[in-house]
Image (cartoon, rainbow, N blue to C red):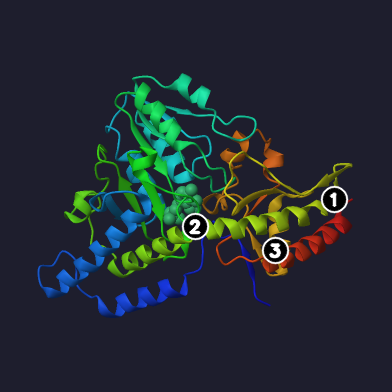
Amino acid sequence: MQPVLLDLAASSPLDPKVRDCLIQHLDEVHGNPSSRHALGTRARQVMEEARRQLARCVGAAPKSIVFTSGGTEANNLGVLGSVPRQGPGRILVGPTEHASVRLATAQLAREGFDVETLRLTRDGQLDLDHATERMNEDVLLVTQMLVSNELGTHYPVKQLARLARARCGKVHFHCDGVQALGKIDLDLEDLGVDSLAISAHKIHGPKGLGALALGPNSRTGPLIFGGSQEGGLRPGTENVPSIAAFSLAADLAHEGRHAFQESAEVCRRELEEALTGISLVYQDSMDGARILQTIGCVKSICAVHLPGPPAEVWQHHLEKHGVFIGVGSACQSTSKEVSPALLALGLDASSARQIARFSFSRETTPNDISIAANALHKVARSLDKLSP
Ligand SMILES: Cc1ncc(COP(=O)(O)O)c(C=O)c1O
């Protein structure tokens, strides 16, 4: 039985073309891009071509792309590298940020900054009125993701960045674009942000590689120290084969983004229909499965309320039927913490634990959803038998 992968926002398999590109460069490009001989020059040419290709996909200048070990490091660099080393100063953090942003700002709070979390409206969008109220000249950093990894919501980053620019003179605006690349149009210049984080393994590229794209007025400095690679912002010999594979993955994802969201919309509708037939008696009342709707979602990430026990129980049962779904974000899955993003949406802790994530890639088909629907029905029947 072929597994059905519906946790593709956590990570996605290598695209065969990207795999070929990676292997070819592993075999053929041996030089250190900082070496001044022919092997080094060849490696540098490959890397700079990849930088140009990646820059095109995110609307940034090639020289502004800094390769990192992934989205986590890119977010840390964009957040921690863009404020002075010590407070005072105010920092505004999006309500559903990934742990790599949230915990980086928690570190800034320990260093004397005043860190405040922005809010969602009742329908799950960013509360721009509240954000406007919280902005003043003391704000040094605003950080807001473009697409939520847990809810799929596409947030109005361009509008928020414009507000921040007008109200907070010294602000650096960081944006986590990890879940946006390959799903929506992504253009650093048009968004008006100072730094934008992306990651390769979310778009069928290799794991352990990401990038931070910087705007023209960014004041980001390094977090680690060493050589002058990546303009001194990220010292250490670059992983040239993975960088080449990343740029190809980004190009394929960027070119295919509209087709992907169209096919994801069909899958989302099928899933929505399948969920209407799934309910369980829970705490003396009938509870049904449904997709949580927030305004302006990408189609390929569905936060789903599953009735009865915590979603983790559904996850384990579905796995026995070869269907893989997500619960919480991948980085939180080992902690008992309830997702702050789900709490920001107004859910209580026990409802938040009933949320699973079904996420698609460009390879997901309606047939995958119909296999998942069958499995969901089987699991619902077995959970129903277990209920007191
Ligand atoms: C929104 C978001 N930001 C950042 C990351 C971290 O990226 P990486 O796994 O490349 O460190 C993830 C991955 O889960 C993510 O979904």
Q: Residue type at mark 2?
A: Arg
Numbered circle sitting on residue 177: none
Write down the residue under mark 3: 369
- Whichever of labels 2 and 1 marks the residue nearer the N terminus, that label is 2
Question: Image height check: is 268 above or below 120?
Answer: below
Describe the element under mark 1 as helix, strand or loop.
Answer: strand
Q: Nearer the viewer, mark 2 or mark 3?
A: 2
Numbered circle sitting on residue 257: 2
Q: Residue type at mark 1?
A: Leu
253 or 43, which lies in front?
A: 253
Location of residue 33 in the rendering, given as x and y in whole percent from the top left corner = 19, 66
Residues at marks 2 and 3 touching, judged by CB atoms closer than 8 Å: no
The residue at the point 87 percent across, 52 percent down is: 387
Question: Image height check: is 164 above or below 22?
Answer: above
Asked whether mark 2 lies closer than 8 Å to ligand 1, one says no
Q: Residues within 10 Å of mark 3 (few under 14, many from 20)?
A: many
